[in-house]
Amino acid sequence: MNRIIKIIFCICILATCSEISATEKNWKYRPDIRASIVGKQPSILTTHGVTYKENFFIGAGTGYIYLLDHMLPIYGTIRGYLPLKNIKHSIVLNLDLGASFFIGNPKSQLWIFYGNLGVGIDWKLKNTYSTISTMIVAQTAAYPIPVPLPGISVSYNF
């Protein structure tokens, strides 16, 4: 039952983001898909939210992580973009915080803390609003003690 409530909550956040971007000219809906390698474990995540004046992003996401066990994270994201002078690219800072639910082993605990901190460069694609971000990340899952694991992440922002 708690999982259903959390999924409904995430859907409501996404619907609110879409509504804000449709009514406010400074806010734009912006989904992305991200692939990461943390330690030796792969993950694929999708985040949906809104950007404000192309400098600040807030949203929520989910995905699949093969870290310690099969996990399904649900998280909130805050991202800041610092434009570099005279070029179209930006420095990006990313913070994901949430919970990760085990889906592979029914005997493991139900959920653990999930966090991801990244810094990198947001590469603007020519003549589009889309970007590709490359980040160095530190991802953690509290199992039983939060230990940050280094990794690399690449995302495509629509």
Image (cartoon, rainbow, N blue to C red):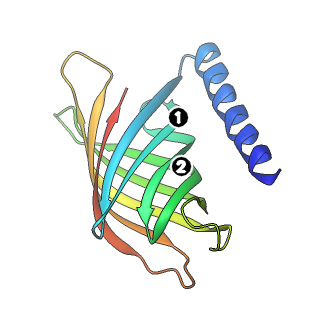
Give amino acid for label 2. Answer: Thr
Q: Out of 142 and 91, give the one closest to the viewer.
A: 142
Question: Dot 1: few (<14), some (14–19), or many (≥20) neighbours within 10 Å?
Answer: many
Q: Which residue is mark 2?
A: 77
Q: Which residue is mark 1?
A: 48
Q: Residue furthest bottom?
A: 145
Spatial CA distance of label 2 from label 1 is 9 Å
Is disc 2 in contact with disc 1, using a CB cutoff of under 8 Å? no
State left or right for residue 30 relative to residue 155. right
The residue under the point 63% across, 31% down is: 14
Counting from the top left corner in percent of width and height, residue 157 is at 36, 32
- Helix, strand, or loop for circle 1? strand
Counting from the top left corner in percent of width and height, residue 56 is at 48, 40
- Helix, strand, or loop for circle 2? strand
Counting from the top left corner in percent of width and height, residue 11 is at 68, 33
Q: Out of 42 and 18, give the one closest to the viewer.
A: 42
Which quadrant does the C terminus fall into? top left
